Image (cartoon, rainbow, N blue to C red):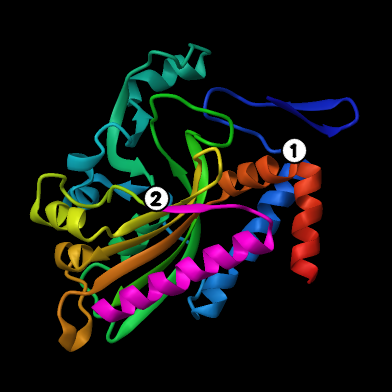
Amino acid sequence: MSTTAEPGIRLANPGPGLVTLDPVHTALFRGLDQLLTGLAARLAAPEVLGPPLLAADGLAKLDYFRNFPHLGVSAGRFTPETHAGLAAGRAPAGQPLEPTGHLLPSATCYGLLLSLEGQDVGDGARLSAVGRCFRNETHYDGLRRLWGFHMREVLYLGTHQGAVDHLDQGARFITATAEQLGLELTRAAADDPFYDKGGSRAKLMKLDPVKHEFSAPDGTAIASVNRHRNFFGERLDIRAGEHGPAHSACVAFGLERWVHAMKLAHGSAEAALDVLHTATRA
C-alpha cells in the first residue's frame, strides 16, 4: 500500500508488516492516541516512557519463552570481524550477528513491570505508556497485523480488588469511546498470554477468564483488558504493602488497529478524521 504525502510524493511501505503512515493517517493515529489517554487522565496514571529493549533473562522469569518463543524479535549486533568488510561496502545480508541478550518489546507493559522489580507499590499504583512493539507473525495484513506497531497501555499494580476495579473502569472507557467514535465493538474472552499454558493459573483461567478483547466487525481486536492476578507480583517480587505480592492488570490499545477500525467504520482515513474531530469537539 502506497500513500500520498504531498503532490508528486508517494510513501511506499518498506516491506511485509511494515507501514509508513501518510499525513492524514498520522493525524488520525495521533488524534486517537490523544483521545485514548483519557483513560490515564481519568485514573490519574502518570505518563512514563518504557525501555526500547528488554533483557531476555528478565523475560524468562515471566514465562515469556514458554508461551511465545515464536513471537520474540531478538536484538543482535554485527560481530567485530565484520566491521571492516561492512565499511568497505560488503552487503550486510548474511553477515554473522552476535546476540545482545535483549529482545525488542512485544507489549508495552513488560518493560514497565521489569522496571518495578523488587519494589513495594503500597495500596496501589498506576502508570501509562505508549511503546513501539514488535512481533514475529505467520503473516501480516495491512494495519490489522504488523511486525512493528504501537501499543498504549494503562497498568495497575496493587490489591486484588484494585485490579478488578481498574479493568471495570477500562472496559467502560473502551465501550464509551467506541460509541463516541461510531465504532461497533464486540467483547469476548480470549486466551491469557502471560501464564504457562500447562500451569495451574492457566487451568483456573478457563473457569475465570482474565483477558477480554474488544473487536471490530471484521474480527480485528483493537483493545483488551487483562487481569494478571499476582503472577507478575510473585515472579518479580513486587509487593503491595501488607497485601503481599501485588496483583496487576492492564488496559491495552493497539493504535494502528484503531486507525484500521475507524477506516472500516467510516470508509476512509479522511472521513474517519472528520468523525474524530467532531467527537473530540463535542
Name the amino acid type tagged 1: Asp
Q: Residue at x 38, y 45 (%)?
A: 106
Q: Residue at x 51, y 14 (%)?
A: 88
Q: Position of residue 78 (x, y in %)?
A: 37, 26
Q: CA distance from mark 2 to mark 1?
A: 25 Å
Q: Is residue 48 visible?
A: no
Q: Is residue 17 left or right of residue 111?
A: right
Q: Is residue 90 visible?
A: yes
Q: Position of residue 145 (x, y in %)?
A: 50, 34
Q: Residue at x 28, y 80 (%)?
A: 161
Q: Residue at x 30, y 43 (%)?
A: 102
Q: Residue furthest right?
A: 7
Q: Position of residue 32 (x, y in %)?
A: 65, 57
Name the residue beneath numbered marker 2.
Answer: 107
Q: Is residue 151 left or right of residue 276?
A: left
For disc 2, the neighbor class at 10 Å (few under 14, some 14 to 19, many from 20) is: many
Disc marking residue 22: 1
